[in-house]
Amino acid sequence: MLADTPFVLTDVCSQMRLIAAANLAALKLGLMPGLSLAEARARVPKLAVGDYDAQGDADCLNRLADGCERFTPFVALDGLHGIVLDITGCAHLFGGEVALRDALVRLMARWGFDVHATIASKPGTARALCEAGLGRIVPAGEEESAVARLPVSALKLNASIITGLMRAGLTHIGALATQPRKALVARFGAQFADALDDVLGRRAKPIAPRRAVPDCLAERRFMEPLTHTAPLPDMLQRLAADLESVLERAGEGARVWEASFFRTDGQVRRIAVTTSRPVRDPKLVTRLLSQKLDRLSDPLDPGFGFDVIRLEAYGRTPVTAVLVSFDGDEQTQADISALIDQLSARFGAHAVQSFVSAQTHWPEAQSHLMPAQQAKDLTPLTTNKLPYEPPTRPLRLFERPERIEVMAQVPDGHPLRFRWRRALHDVTRAEGPERIAPEWWKHEAASLTRDYFRIEDRDGHRFWVFRDGVQLRETRAPSWFMHGLFA
Amino acid sequence: MTEGRLAALRQTIAAIELEGVRRPQPLSFGLSLLDERLGGGLASGALHEIYAAKPSDVATATGFVAALAVRSRPGPILWVRQSFSAQEGGGLYGPGLADLGLDPARVICIDLSRPADLLRAAHDGLTCAVLSAVVVEPWGQAKVFDLTALRKLALTARSSGVPAFCLRLAAEPAPSPALTRWVVRAVPSKGDSRLGPGAMSFEARLVLNRRGQSDVWLLEWESDGCVFRHLSSLPQSALSASVDAAPARLSAARRHVG
């Protein structure tokens, strides 16, 4: 049985194989993490050895943290083996702190993990007690008495400070609590005093949650886990309706909607949709989420069932109710936004684009496409074209100008004949040059000055070509390129 | 009198077909010859196909579609294109659209790699009645654009009243339920040659017209007024389907461009 055999995981550290983790049987035999493998094998010949997978451990911890999110959205990782949950305001949903702690421990046991769980009003206190192996609930205000019996090594400081403290006779945290802070700072440094204050609960270092905390959320917990995906849209609509009443009271809408599906085995799957304007209509949100669910390349698998389904809203912004106006402009705008949202949800936000202009005369940068949901306040495009003149810019532009062979008068003449994509063209009309110099303060690669020509060939096709580089001043043998096609 | 009775019969049939469905204004060309042939103009809630005569006419066909979109009612335009089309023939350029008279802020571009997705996006767009036009731009023959798929598009367009333009580049005309089919070819522009290339000039050949006869016209697009004009000054030989291009001599070319 593996539980009885001493089993260690080893990792290479500075060209030596050291024990990274050991099971209970190995620990009892004195094989601690940090011991070299050679030494361990010498002590225990029949040692089972495996490789330490740091990434696997981290992934596992992340999955467990995901699973813990069913208790509170405020979850953070603590070191390599710990998870911190901020359950302020959540405990009553589970019937009190005791019940919450029991539920968490039971859940972890079901997933195959033995945990210590400690609840306290300050994170430092809870962490110190938890790492010492004391899983309990500390009432508010009793942090100091709770940690008084812990040894000073629980403060996680370097060995020299610990030795110093031992020599001074301060072996337990309780003894340190009564010392004046100034003396401790003078003797051991401010970092030590801060660490002590954390553990004693005199100050609370803020926890950064793994994921952004939503502005508001609604969830449903199931006594019997949901094993089919068919009732999901209906469930999402109910959750969206709950959130709608919350948002409506505040007169706000949200732009990012995320649905989380918590499985009984701890796995969490999340689907998010973004809208271009803040919305709160449950039907719209449900439709967008359902479309996304249908289009998942890896369909939602309930496994043994979904325990909890949660809908989170991010990016709350005030939204004015859409009043029916006689000119219908507001409604049109809303319809277009809804279409953009629907297409973005179906094909991806990057596929749906609108034109954005920039204040530059370099052709490639002057106008480009940006995801429509992000493009706001489009500056109107000003055209250089004079009235009653033909277009100065091509309708179709090649992303990469294509090399062409040109016969032209040197040094500054327009093309007379050119070869492009294996076809020879005779130029019948030409206009130019339009000299466009690169913005030297922007372009790192030495772009050359371009002389653009609008040319038309015998068949009536109109092209936009340029000569790259001014003859003799910038380059000896300038090349010619095809950049765009006119209609 | 038969003409009158025929016209009345056509109207009755049209009324039966479009019963219970919105009937928006047709897209008029502003030229009486064209509008009469089309029965008032390009019908709004229908599918129209525009083919580029040769791969080199890609930009001209695109320009024709852009011009039609401008002449449609004001509103946003959905342009669904296949990514390969941008690689082969260049992508839509904002200032170029502006120079043709189409405000690029009106255009919502969808860039997709699979032709099947193009059809679905076009469907979604055609259900939104506030759009002024939906343009679908696949590249090549695109087997998914078969009779059934195009018929579905036509029906969706009819129920919402949004015109659907199918811009077919590098493809041969195939049977389809389109109301009209055009083949567009570039022609030399007119105007003072010393000023360089002129406005967009092209030959628009109406090869399929369910409301009348086929015909061919030489047109020019004036971007300032957003109007089509007849290119009447061009000699008749320019109407030929195959242009027999004799290589110009260098001196003649130099003389022409000045």
Image (cartoon, grey):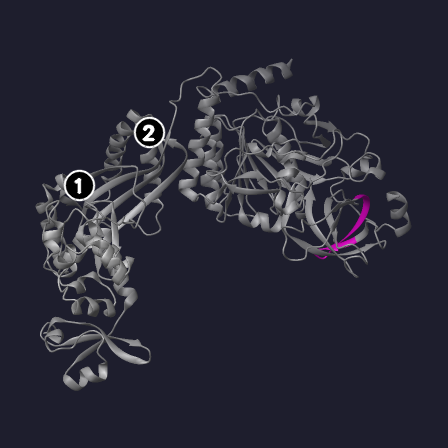
Query: From the image, which quarter does the N terminus of chain B lie in?
Result: top right
Residue at the (63%, 23%) spot, across then down: B28
Q: Can residue A106 be seen in this view?
A: no
Q: Are marks 1 and 2 in contact (CB under 8 Å)?
A: no
Answer with left or right where residue A56 lies relative to residue A134: right
Mark 1 or mark 2: name the one nearer the start of the chain. Answer: 1
- Work out whether residue A179 or residue A425 is closer to the camera in this orientation and state it: A179
10 Å crowding of disc 2: few (<14), some (14-19), many (20+)? some
Question: In the rendered image, which residue does mark 1 sit on?
Answer: A90
Q: Where is residue B242 in the image (x, y as percent from the top left)?
A: 75, 44
Inspect the magenta stretch and tell me whether residue A419 lies in it.
Answer: yes
Disc 1 to disc 2, C-alpha distance = 27 Å
Report the quarter where the C terminus of chain B lies: top right
Residue B38 lies within the magenta run: no
Query: Does A211 sit left or right of B17 as displayed?
Result: left
Give the residues in magenta.
Answer: A418-432
Indicate the position of residue A65 as horizontal and vertical percent values.
23, 53
The answer for which chain carries disc 1 is A
Of residues B75 and B48, the one nearer the viewer is B75
Q: Is residue A14 above or below residue A271?
A: below
Label 1, secondary structure: give it.
loop
Three-letter code, disc 1: Cys
At label 1, counting other C-alpha atoms closer than 10 Å, the crowd grade (few under 14, some 14-19, many 20 or more) is some
Q: Do badges 1 and 2 share one subunit?
A: yes
At x 78% / y 61%, what residue is drawn? Answer: A477
Chain letter for mark 2: A
Viewer-proximal residue among A391 and B233: A391
Which mark, residue A281? 2
Q: In the image, which is nearer the foreground, mark 1 or mark 2?
A: 1
Residue B252 image position (x, y, % from top left): 90, 47
